[in-house]
Amino acid sequence: MKKVQSSVADALEGVLFDGMTIMAGGFGLCGIPEALIYAIRDSGVRDLTVISNNAGVDGIGLGVLLETKQIRKMISSYVGENKLFAQQYLSGELELEFNPQGTLAERIRAGGAGIPAFFTKTGVGTIIAEGKDVREFDGESYVMERGLFADLSIVHAYKGDTEGNLVYRKTARNFNPIMATASKFTVAEVEHLVEAGMIDGDHVHTPGIFVKRIVHVPNPTKHIEQRTTRPRLVAENGAH
């Protein structure tokens, strides 16, 4: 099967439908599949459930899907950088399933590994555990969490080959590798596309067997979520 597609629209052709569940890689704005997010926006698909660490920021990342009100529900661990998200949630337009960040990561990993549920101590005795099965193991209480599995995963990789093997760069790896395993259909956008065999097998983070389609998106914009700097120190003689 030919995995490499000529455009992001082609990469999502025949995959999208109203009411579907989508996993979107990234952490903040680092490692987000931005081109694929824009293609989802342009498709007009609606009533989406989106599983992502966060909801981007206003006007960037998943924030563009909030602007068009294409997302019905978010399954996330942090949404504090998006004012529109807060407005839609507080007005009842957007449903939210909040997770401790480690629990969210494990729910995704479990889904990709075919594990339907697991028990964790995180959240016991809090609203996180309300309505969930709580059991005792070795004298300690644990809450049951369900694994997550989506209709589609969209991920961003630094490098990929024509067989779909992926390499992520540094912190942009974040949620991308586990999400690539936890859906029926994974589409990857890559900054550098190479021929099969050009990536050392020991360097592959996501094996191509998990990736159905791949699209080359060179020179993507690398957004900075919060620019933090300190004043430059200048000596009395003017030297830096």
Image (cartoon, rainbow, N blue to C red):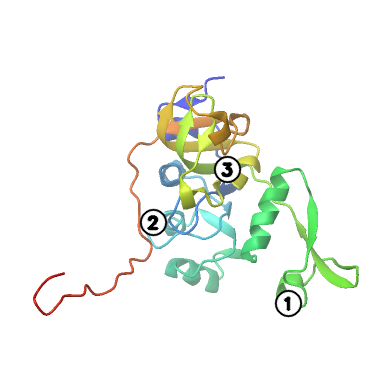
In the foreground, 55 or 158? 158
Of the numbered discs 2 and 3, the one sitting upstream in the chain is 2
The kind of residue on which mark 1 rests is: Thr
Relative to 194, 179 lies left or right: right
Horizontal and vertical percent for residue 7? Answer: 40, 31
Of the numbered discs 1 and 3, the one sitting upstream in the chain is 1
Whether residue 20 is visible: no
Tag on residue 101?
none
Cα distance between the residues tagged 2 and 1: 32 Å
**Dot 3: within a 10 Å radius of its alpha carbon, few (fewer than 14), some, or many (20 or more) residues?**
many
Of the numbered discs 2 and 1, the one sitting upstream in the chain is 2
Q: Which residue is mark 3?
A: 153
Q: Which part of the image, by quadrant, shows the C terminus?
A: bottom left
Q: Which part of the image, by quadrant, shows the N terminus?
A: top right
In the foreground, 13 or 141? 141
Residue at image location 58% in from the left, 48% down from the top: 23
The kind of residue on which mark 3 rests is: Ser
Q: Which residue is mark 2?
A: 60
